[in-house]
Amino acid sequence: MDSQKLTKRQSDMKRLGKIGLGKIGLMTIALSLMAGSAGAAVENLVAKEFTKVMPDGVAIAMWGFARASDTSCPSTSIVEGPSAPGPFIIVPHFDDVLEINLCNELDEPVSVVIPGQAMPKNGVAGTLLSPVYHTAGKFAGRVRSFTQEAAASGGTQSYTWDAYKHGTYMYESGSHPQVQIQMGLYGGMKKDFGAWRLAYDGNAHQLGGFFYDHEAILFYSEIDRALHDAVGAGTYDPEGDPALVMTSIADYHADYGLINGQAFPAVAPIVIGTSGDTLLRFYSASPDDRTPVMQGLYAKHIAQDGKLYPYFSEQYSLRLPAGSTRDVMLTVDCMQAGTPGRHVLYDARMKLTNAGSASAGGMRINLQLCDPPADADLDGLPDDQDNCTNTSNSDQRDTDGDGYGNVCDADFNNDGTVNFSDLGIMRDRFYDSDPDADLDGSGIVNYGDLGIMRSQFFQTPGPSALGD
């Protein structure tokens, strides 16, 4: 361990000792501060295709990062599948070096950048990785990627940040970002300033720094179905081929607004069960600015894009520009009247609907404070926002958009009762792929769906908190 790193950790320890936390003793803090060994945090990411089924049953072609345990490519060691946002990266507070090894299984080049951090190098003592330029076509001479790329269909590239700063950041593709980020190549990351949940160092207005008891991630993103369909079908071409469907994102229009990769009501609520300070880390991969509003709550705004504010403000809303991060400290007092219960966090710019759904959706999430919500079927959705309250269905699949999830809605003709008319409809669609009759989401109507219908025969659909 070098002397500079040791001095920094000793400074952290003294700061913690002055605050006098009752949670743990000073000796425990000291041991935790000294336990880490100097070195690099290493992440192995894989860029892959995957399919995401939206609440209206539509399957969207996506790209996303997966996490692997080694650098094989094509990867044979994936431990966390592709998703959007991708795997959450935690850089230990005692590591100043981050290394990301990228395996690219997509059919076009991909890279990794971290806005707010320095550009990556080709090793701790290496040189900066250079941008990549178009060499032919109408964009010849223009930048194609902010840094070196992993080539298509099995290419690899390593990136090193040798002075990684603490704070809240996003990682994303630096190649063709207007399309690759929209397709899902992004994720969240954090590095705390010190041990025991010390997010940021103090300043003249917060001498002890910012400790937190709880933490919650709120990652905002959107999906323009037309773009995803065009990329998935190979009919997107930025060179402007008139024979293809889409040549730019100039007419971008989001069909779905997501938080943590899910559209309301499928997005799981944030549950804060006890009093204390909760650090809300906001991320935005949306191409538009968003304005989260915490209904009935005020929180302290402490940092933007990993940089501590010189002055802090107490507000009930925040501006979340495209591609940015925000850190907000919410203090919960369960003894204060009006605090326990559900508080809605929604987008004031009104991205509150989903394509193909008549019910509320989009960028909305519930904060459940002090008293956990009832969840009869244990699917992670509170009963008051679950479209099948007695049957587990965390995907909230509702292909006919009537507010009743498919798994508890064998009432195909919507007459209010599951009966022989519905059985006739299922018979006509047996061994077909009709999404409304596919009750279990297997992709085909078969005896599994018939068994679900039988359990609901002569009953009403639901129950559902979202149905009429």
Image (spheres, rainbow, N blue to C red):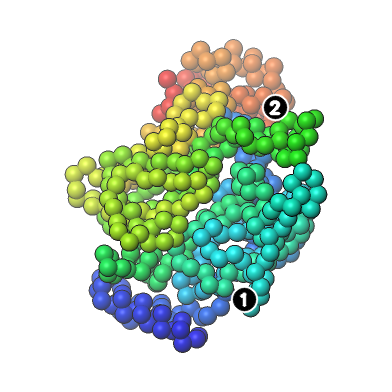
Point out residue 254 in the picture as x, y percentages from the top left corner. 55, 34
Describe the element under mark 2 as helix, strand or loop.
loop
What's the amino acid at mark 1? Answer: Val
| Residue at mark 2 to residue at mark 1: CA–CA distance | 53 Å
| Residue with the most extreme front position | 141
Q: Pick the residue in front: 386 or 448.
A: 386
Residue 306: where, in percent of width, then height? Answer: 44, 60
Residue at 59% across, 16% down: 422
Seen in the picture, residue 367 relative to 465 is either above or below; the reply is below
The disc, 2 or 1, on the residue closer to the chain's N-terminal end is 1
On the image, the x and y values in percent for residue 257 come to: 51, 37
Q: Secondary structure at mark 1?
A: loop
Question: Disc 2 marks which amino acid?
Answer: Ser
Q: Which residue is mark 2?
A: 433
Among the 4 quarters of the image, the one containing residue 183: top right
Contact (Cβ within 8 Å) of mark 2 with mark 1: no
Badge 2 density bin: few <14, some 14–19, many ≥20, Cα 10 Å: some
Q: Which residue is mark 1?
A: 124
As displayed, is residue 403 above or below residue 324?
above
Residue 92 % position (x, y): 49, 70
